[in-house]
Image (tube, helix red, strand yellow):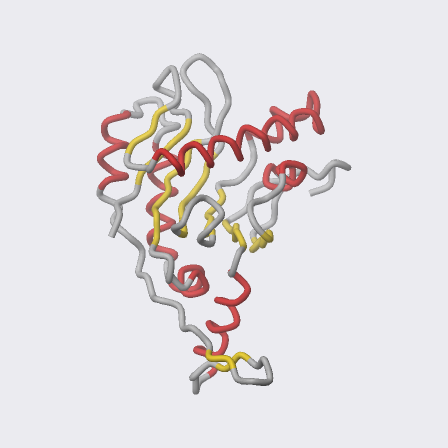
Amino acid sequence: MSTPGFYGKLAVRGDFIHRGLAPGFVEAWDNWLTTGITASRQTLGEAWLDAYLVSPLWRFAIAPGLLGQEAFCGVMMPSVDRVGRYFPLTIALALPVQTDLGHLLSETDDWFERAEALLLSTLEADADADAFEHGVGALGSPLLALGSVPRRDTSGAEIWSVDNPRARGLALMQQASSGASLWWGRGSERVAPGLVRFAGLPPAEAFCRLLGESAGGEA
């Protein structure tokens, strides 16, 4: 089992920081964020900074194949470095390919809440980068379950061996997360709490939605 890592900007440091995440993830995550931030700046213009600063913390679960072979989960927070350059700070954890992301969303709030608390601690006046790094390393892993693979018959039907309402719901949630990225959280003054699903990673033109602004300025 892998351990959590982090990547992004920290207010007490002057440049990007990263620990514990594979180079392939860091490169893909950075490319996605940079493209999305650039597109949202072009769309929102002078309104971008206000939208960014009050954007919510997003919890995420990302299916295998979108950021590498593994699945990923974590939390992303708007942040800034010591010299005023804006870029999110992310805590992320690589997950086994077979991880049931539906179970992750419905059963594991505690891990995400602790990750959020660590991210928010970096905004305090007495924030310490070493303490943050130690805290991330101590997060461990959320409670995971492996997804159930349906069998297929000659008619093309997918059949799960489940016999109770909860198991049926989790089976459908597992299918909904296939090839997708899932985003949820407590919201902000511009974003209501909820769950957002994208087929793949959010496209650059949809990044405004994560900030709380659509192209038309409506959340």
**Residue shown at 54%/28% (left/top)?**
34
Q: Where is residue 193? Give x, y as percent.
A: 56, 51
Nearest the viewer among 54 and 148 is 148
Q: In which quarter of the view is residue 54 placed? A: top right
**Residue shown at 27%/25% (left/top)?**
128
Nearest the viewer among 101 and 109 is 101
- Above/below status of 175 relative to 193: below
Nearest the viewer among 102 and 29 is 29
**Residue shown at 49%/47% (left/top)?**
66
Q: Where is residue 184? Give x, y as percent.
A: 52, 51
Q: Residue furthest top?
A: 83
- Residue 112 left/right relative to 193: left
The quarter of the image holding the C terminus is top right
Q: Residue furthest bottom?
A: 163
Q: Residue furthest right?
A: 216
**Residue shown at 53%/56% (left/top)?**
179
Q: Where is residue 92? Give x, y as percent.
A: 37, 42
- Residue 160 left/right relative to 195: left
